[in-house]
Amino acid sequence: ARGLDLSRVRACVVVAEERPRMALTHSFSKLFKDLGLHPRSVSTAFGCRVNLAICLQGTSGPDPTTVYVDMRALRHDRVRLVERGSPHSLPLMESGKILPGVRIIIANPETKGPLGDSHLGEIWVHSAHNGSGYYSGYGEEVLQSDHFNSRLSFGDTQTVWARTGYLGFLRRTELTDANGERHDALFVVGALEEAMELRGMRYHPIDIETSVIRAHKSIMECAVFTWTNLLVVVVELEGSEQEALDLVPMVTKAVLEEHYLIVGVVVVTDIGVIPINSRGEKQRMHLRDGFLQDQLDPIYVAYNM
C-alpha cells in the first residue's frame, strides 16, 4: 500500500442486510486511517431484496446516531431507551437517513397493524423503486403478493407496502442534516426469520453470539439457531482440540447469565465451518441445514437434553 492516498475518498459505504456492525465500521476506519481515509467517509446503508436502497448515512449529514436500548424489553418487542452503561443495555447504531421518496412504517408482522414508537416491528417500505417480485431459477416470475403488495389492516389501508422481513424501529433524531432539517433514523435489529422464539420471548442471534464470543479467547466465531425447542450454539475454535471440552461450560454459563437461556447443544468446530456470504454476514439457516444433515464434521458436540 506504499504511496496509496485515500484522503480524496468521499464515501465508503458498508452495505448490510442486517444490524450495522459497529465494530467492523470502527475497525475499518482505524485500519486505513494512516492512508488518509477520514472516519466521516465510512458510512452505512441498509437495503434488502424488496428494496436495495432504503436508507444511507451520507458524508454530508451528521454522524450516525447510536442509542442504547434495554435488551430485556427488546425480547418482548418493546423499545425502551436507557443510558449508556446501564445494566442490560444494548448499543444500536442507525442504519442511515431514509432516502428521498422512501416511506417507512413499522408494522406488526402478525396482525399487519401499524405500531407506535415504543414497539419493535417489521420494517415496511413504500417507494417507486420497490421490487415487484422474485424470479425463480427457471426464469419464471413468481410474484409474492404478501411480500411486495401488503396493506395495513387498519389506518392507511390504501398505500401498498413491501415487507422487508427485518425487525426494527424509527426514531426522530435531534441532529440536523445539511439542509438544517431533523431526520428520522432507522434502526435495524435483525431478520424476522432468524429471530428465535424461546420461553415466550423473541431473541436475536447476534446478541447471544456476542456473549459467546466474549466467553473465551479461543472462540473465533459463533452462530446460534434453534432445533425443535433447543438452542444450538456453534463455535469455531482456534487452538488445540483439547480445549474443546473446556469451552462447553464457559459457553453455557455466558448464555445463562446474560440471556437466562439454557443451551441445548454446543457444537465445537474448526475455523471456517460457519458459512459467510459475500457481505460478511452469517448464513445461519445454511448452518442449521448442515447441522441437521450431519455435515459439520465437529471437533466435539455436547448435548444438554
Image (cartoon, helix red, strand yellow):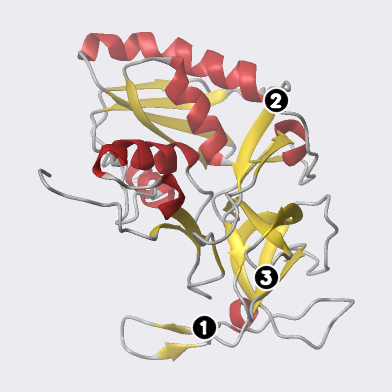
Q: Which mark is residue 131?
A: 1
Foreground of the two, 204 or 188? 188
Query: Could you tell me which residue is drawn at 39 percent across and 50 percent down?
Result: 281
Q: CA distance from mark 2 to mark 3?
A: 28 Å
| Disc 1 element | loop
Q: CA distance from mark 3 to mark 1?
A: 13 Å
First reached walking from the N terminus: tag 2 or tag 1: 2
Q: Amino acid at mark 3?
A: Trp
Read off the residue under disc 3: 124
Read off the residue under disc 2: 88
Give the x, y percent position of residue 152: 80, 76
Q: Which mark is residue 36?
A: none
Quadrant placement of the N terminus:
top left
First reached walking from the N terminus: tag 3 or tag 1: 3
Q: Is 170 situated above or below 232? A: below
Q: Quadrant of residue 157?
A: bottom right
Query: Could you tell me which residue is drawn at 38 percent across and 44 percent down?
Result: 292
| Disc 2 element | loop
- Crowding around mark 3 (Cα neighbors within 10 Å: few <14, some 14 to 19, many 20+) is many
Query: Could you tell me which residue is drawn at 32 percent across and 54 percent down?
Result: 277
Query: Could you tell me which residue is drawn at 85 percent across and 58 percent down?
Result: 116
Q: Residue furthest left?
A: 2
Give the x, y percent position of residue 75: 72, 39
Give the x, y percent position of residue 69: 72, 37
First reached walking from the N terminus: tag 2 or tag 3: 2
Compared across the picture, whether 281 is left or right of 241 comes to right
Q: Amino acid at mark 1?
A: Gly
